[in-house]
Image: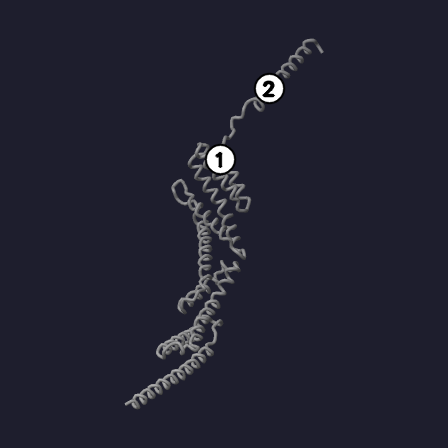
Amino acid sequence: MTDSKRTGIKVLLLILGVVLCVGGILVFYKTKVSPPTNLKYGNQHLNYLKSEISSLRDSKEQNDTALYNIMDELSWYHRDDFISHQEYGILTDSLAKAYVPLFISASKMEFKKDVWDNAKLNNILSHINMLRGWTTNNGDPVISGNLAQGLNDIETTISQYRKAWVIANSTNFHGMIAAKSVIESAHYYSNLSNLQSCTSLMEALSSVAPTLERQHFRIIKSKVQSLNRGWIYTDQDNYSARVNSASNAVKEYSNGARSTYGSYASSTSSLSASIKAYKSQADAYYLEKAKEEFERQQADQQENTLEW
């Protein structure tokens, strides 16, 4: 190989080396040194809140602490302009849709207990009031549709529960018409499926009819018993009025007891028999008193005749 050829090869190799070196530098600059030009920037505060709301939804259980923390953060970020007014509205809507289903589910679980806690029921109602206060940017309620109906159902159940307890505690007798109305209401509430898991309420409602019946029967029995020897302390007209009052009370009970108290109704045959017996004794007593008075008057007349 001649010198000229060797020189040509060296030149070619030198050129090739320079090309490779420059190419490597360009590749390194393009991929490692030069900053990317297609990065996507986002609001990290917005992304953080979205993540927190997703975590609340995915927890599958009511978490009030997480709810209040997110609510506070929403207010702070909105106040400090880290999120826009529109983003605030969107996040509030997302938070409601994440939390309300969990809240409804937890509330319904409370209704499956044997005994319901009034403090917890009050807490549920206060949560509903809070949730109904959430509005969109347009001022419309955030909670709507099925979620709103779910809250309505919870309120209805609590209202029915408390009305049922009023009926269950209405066991003072105030007349047969009032008693029948109370017993019918007790029957109505005891048949509501959403209340039947509360055994304490069901037991109280089932005792309404027998309790009212016992009070009613005790009243008429006391009326009848007061006739015993009552003739000694009053005149015949007054005693007759008392007998009629007791008889009417027994008749009223007898005529309406079965339709009002059902199987709890008591027999009044012994009371009717007692009234008859007391009246008979009273009639004999007043007849004897009349005879004594007649004989006294006859004796007075004879004494006056002898003096003349």
In-image side of 304 versus 137 (left or right): left
Q: Residue 46 bears which disc, if any?
A: 1
In the rendering, at what x and y percent does residue 9 appear?
A: 67, 13
The secondary structure type at the circle numbered 2 is helix
Q: Quadrant of residue 281?
A: bottom left
- Please name whichever residue, 58 or 12, is drawn nearer the observer in this view of the structure: 58
Category of crowding for the residue at label 2, using alpha-carbon neighbours closer than 10 angstroms: few (below 14), some (14–19), many (at least 20): few
Disc 1/disc 2 C-alpha distance (Å):
40 Å
Residue 25 is labelled as 2
* SS at circle 1: helix
Query: Mark 1 or mark 2: which is in front?
Result: 1
The percent coordinates of residue 223 (x first, y second) are 42, 73
Q: Residue 32 falls in which quadrant of the image?
A: top right
Residue 153 lies, in percent from the top left, at: 45, 54
Observer-nearest of 267 and 244 = 244
* Residue located at (61% from left, 20% from top): 24
Q: Residue at x 47, y 38 (%)?
A: 72
Asked whether the residues under the numbered discs 1 and 2 touch, taking CB atoms below 8 Å apart as contact, a structural biologist would say no
**Applied colour scheme:** one colour
Q: Please, is residue 221 above or below residue 90 in the view? A: below
* Precedes in sequence: disc 1 or disc 2: 2
Q: Residue lying at the far right in this picture: please name it.
A: 1
Under mark 2, the amino acid is Ile
Residue 68: percent from left, percent from top: 49, 41
Instruction: Kindly identify the amino acid type of the residue bearing the numbered disc 1.
Output: Leu
Can residue 257 be spotted in the picture? no
Q: Is residue 125 left or right of residue 296?
A: right
Location of residue 81 with respect to 172 vertically, above or below: above
- The N terminus: image quadrant: top right
Outermost residue on the left side: it is: 308
Rendered-image quadrant of the C terminus? bottom left
Which of 225 and 174 lies nearest the eye of the viewer? 225
